[in-house]
Image: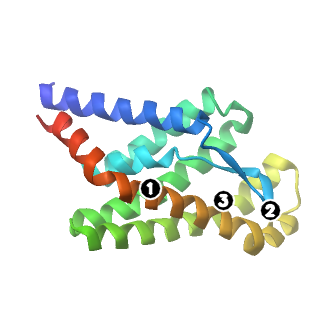
Amino acid sequence: MTSRKIKQLATLGILIAISIILIISPLRFPFPPAPFLEYDAGDIPILMGGFIFGPLAGILLSVVTSIVQAVTVSSGSGWIGCVMHIFAASALVGVSSAIYSRSRNMKGMIIGLVCGSLAMTAVMIPLNLIFYPLFANTPVDAVIAMIVPVLLPFNLMKAGINSVVFLLIFKSAGNLLLGIAKK
């Protein structure tokens, strides 16, 4: 393995560690209409990896981070939380970084983040319909009733905040990580 590949793997490992730290940090807060849903900033480093190394790396980061999160800090949500986070984060980072990889400028970044946020929100509706009744022993009708007042706003808020924060830090943090990983 070349030293460049080793540096890229080390950078991806650092991004996973930062994501886990952000998940357990005080930056977490419950969503007022549904306190069982919590915002966390853990997807920001995953976005960073996707935009620096491409969509496949971003999806890989989503999978590894979700598994590490499931067996450590979020063990209460078990395999259901892990699967849902893999799909949510993969939709956000996969779509946004794929669009950005075709148009590497601010316009491509913004379009990518908006489309990624919408993709994450769209993916989470059927996943909630499938998995939330299993997790919370709740009828599907109750989940359907939560789609518009709770699930749509929560997922748009989470993806939107993470996208805006990512947008604000990408230039400086992205260049730093890229410089380390690509040397």
Say left or right for 115 vs 82. Answer: left
Residue type, mark 2 in image: Pro
Q: Residue at x 54, y 34 (%)?
A: 67
- Label number found at residue 33: 2
Q: Residue at x 77, y 72 (%)?
A: 149
> Spatial distance from mark 3 to mark 2, Cα to Cα?
20 Å
Which numbered disc, 3 or 2, marks the residue that appears first in the sequence? 2
- Nearer to us of marks 1 and 3 is 1
Please tell me which residue lies in front, 62 or 162.
Answer: 162
Question: Total marks drawn?
Answer: 3
- Nearer to us of marks 1 and 2 is 1
| Residue 29 location (% of width, % of height) | 68, 48
- Label number found at residue 165: 1
Please tell me which residue lies in front, 56 or 153.
Answer: 153
Specify how the rendered protein is coloured: rainbow
Which numbered disc, 1 or 2, marks the residue that appears first in the sequence? 2
Residue marked by disc 3? 127
> Spatial distance from mark 1 to mark 2, Cα to Cα?
23 Å
| Residue 3 location (% of width, % of height) | 13, 25
* Mark 2 element type: loop
| Residue 92 location (% of width, % of height) | 46, 59
Say left or right for 158 vs 180. Answer: right
The answer to which image quadrant residue 79 occupies is: top right
